[in-house]
Image (tube, coloured by chain):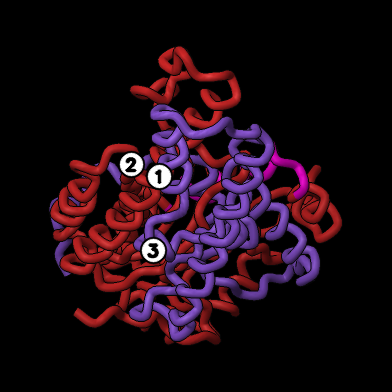
């Protein structure tokens, strides 16, 4: 027999009371079914929760698990899966990974305390989605024109090497210059559609998926109906910029714009 | 409030979403509220540092000169630092060119060689890439990857 604690995923607005059916059959963290907790019987502000084994989510165990990349990935994907399912039907405020309560009653008390603040933020996020935009400087082609050492017949090996290095550097610097221009174009294009932006750190660690070097990693808050135009305009900025790639990911629930209750709300960009 | 039709469309990238994109959101973003199970702040900090090593190191980004937003007057009040890092970059690249020249003992100028020398001179950065300056480790990082 395993003791259970309650994992909380997100706060959401259950406009028409159908959100729980949307979640039926969806496995949460630890594969348990996801339920909705309300402060009052017909309240539309809900917290999505599911039971998780206490032995894995007590402080000591959690600390150890978070060091385990496989465990972390499984929990992160499950957490994200539930938030995406909610976001299909409702406005969602994602909670930070591993927000755990002793039981559902404790979640209800938390929701009761913060209901108005959640409600305000949910209203601010209604109809808005997050899009990620990443700009990459691609690796220069291996052999390019006179840069290839084989084309340096007549030069000493040292000179050929220098010439090769120099040409490589030129190609790289051109690509960075292009990327800088593209980043300005992206910002201008995005500003026509988005209402807010936050900047993430460029992804450069071992999880970063190339090819190329990520130099810009931003998130924009975009009205749902403007999403197509946003993507089209943002992706178009890379046209005619060889060596630079622009990627858009989304729509995401507004992870990057849901702010903690004791901090300032997200500042809206001026139009 | 009625749902817009696009709400019913497939949402996000589902299970195919890039793990780095997911982790940077679920661990570093979202609402932080105190649950009953507390991981102390130091642990969260350590975890965040480890995550950044995996996903995105801000210090490494700065070290590699990817901090152009700090030099953008529209985004930061610290934009005036931009010209300084351009000068640093310029100085560094000139020193590197000198070192390369000495290391290979360039023979006296002939037609091909003088062309070569001009090429080396032009290795110094174009003025407009100042915001991307300070790229000392860019080359070596690629080798590690």
> Quick one: label 3, few (<14), some, or many (20+) residues within 10 Å?
many
Residue A70 sits above or below residue A40 on the image: above
Whole-angstrom CA distance, mark 1 to mark 2, is 5 Å
Residue A123 sits above or below residue A178 on the image: below
Say which element carries label 2.
strand
**Image point 37% across, 23% down: which residue?**
A146
Q: Is residue B137 left or right of residue A35?
A: right
**Image point 47% across, 71% down: which residue?**
A38
Which badge, 2 or 3, comes first in the chain's sequence?
Answer: 2
Q: Do residues under tags 1 and 2 come within 8 Å of each other at their CB atoms? A: yes
Residue, disc 1: A136
Camera-side residue of B69 and B105: B105
Q: Main secondary structure of the magenta part?
A: helix
Q: Is residue A43 magenta?
A: no
Question: Residues in magenta?
Answer: A67-83
Residue, disc 3: A254
Frontmost of labels 2 and 3 is 2
Residue, disc 2: A245
The tint of chain B in the picture is purple
- Find residue A130 and report its horizontal and vertical position in percent: 34, 60
Marks 1/2 same chain: yes
């Amino acid at each position: 027999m395993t003791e259970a604690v309650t994992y909380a995923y997100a706060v959401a607005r259950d406009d028409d009371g159908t959100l729980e059916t949307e979640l039926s059959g969806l496995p949460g963290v630890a594969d348990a079914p996801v339920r909705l907790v309300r402060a009052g019987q017909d309240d539309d502000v809900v917290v999505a929760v599911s039971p998780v084994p206490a032995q894995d989510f007590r402080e000591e165990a959690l600390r150890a698990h978070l060091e385990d990349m496989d465990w972390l990935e499984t929990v992160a994907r499950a957490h994200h899966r539930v938030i995406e399912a909610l976001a299909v039907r409702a406005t969602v405020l994602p909670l930070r990974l591993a927000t755990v309560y002793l039981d559902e009653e404790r979640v209800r008390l938390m929701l009761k305390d913060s209901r108005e603040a959640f409600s305000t933020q949910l209203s601010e996020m209604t109809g808005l989605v997050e899009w990620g935009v990443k700009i990459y400087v691609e690796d220069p082609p291996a052999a390019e024109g006179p840069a290839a050492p084989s084309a340096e017949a007549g030069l000493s090996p040292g000179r050929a090497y220098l010439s090769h290095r120099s040409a490589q550097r030129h190609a790289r610097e051109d690509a960075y210059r292009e990327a800088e221009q593209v980043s300005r174009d992206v910002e201008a294009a995005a500003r026509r559609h988005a209402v807010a932006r936050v900047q993430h750190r460029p992804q450069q660690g071992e999880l970063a998926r190339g090819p190329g070097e990520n130099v810009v990693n931003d998130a924009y808050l975009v009205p749902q109906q403007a999403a197509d135009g946003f993507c089209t305009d943002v992706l178009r900025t890379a046209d005619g910029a060889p060596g630079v790639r622009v990627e858009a990911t989304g729509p995401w629930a507004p992870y990057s714009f849901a702010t903690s209750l004791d901090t300032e709300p997200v500042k809206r960009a001026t139009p | 409030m009625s749902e817009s039709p696009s709400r019913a469309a497939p949402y996000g990238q589902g299970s195919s979403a890039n793990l780095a994109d997911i982790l940077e959101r679920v661990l570093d973003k979202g609402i932080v509220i105190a649950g009953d199970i507390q991981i102390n702040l130091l642990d969260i900090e350590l975890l965040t540092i480890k995550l950044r090593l995996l996903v995105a190191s801000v210090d490494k980004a700065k070290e590699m000169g990817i901090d152009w937003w700090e030099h953008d007057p529209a985004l930061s009040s610290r934009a005036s630092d931009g010209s300084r890092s351009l000068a640093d970059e310029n100085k560094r690249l000139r020193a590197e060119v000198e070192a390369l020249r000495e290391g290979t003992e360039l023979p006296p100028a002939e037609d091909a060689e003088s062309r070569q020398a001009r090429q080396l001179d032009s290795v110094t950065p174009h003025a407009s890439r100042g915001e991307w300056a300070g790229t000392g480790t860019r080359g070596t990082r690629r080798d590690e990857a």
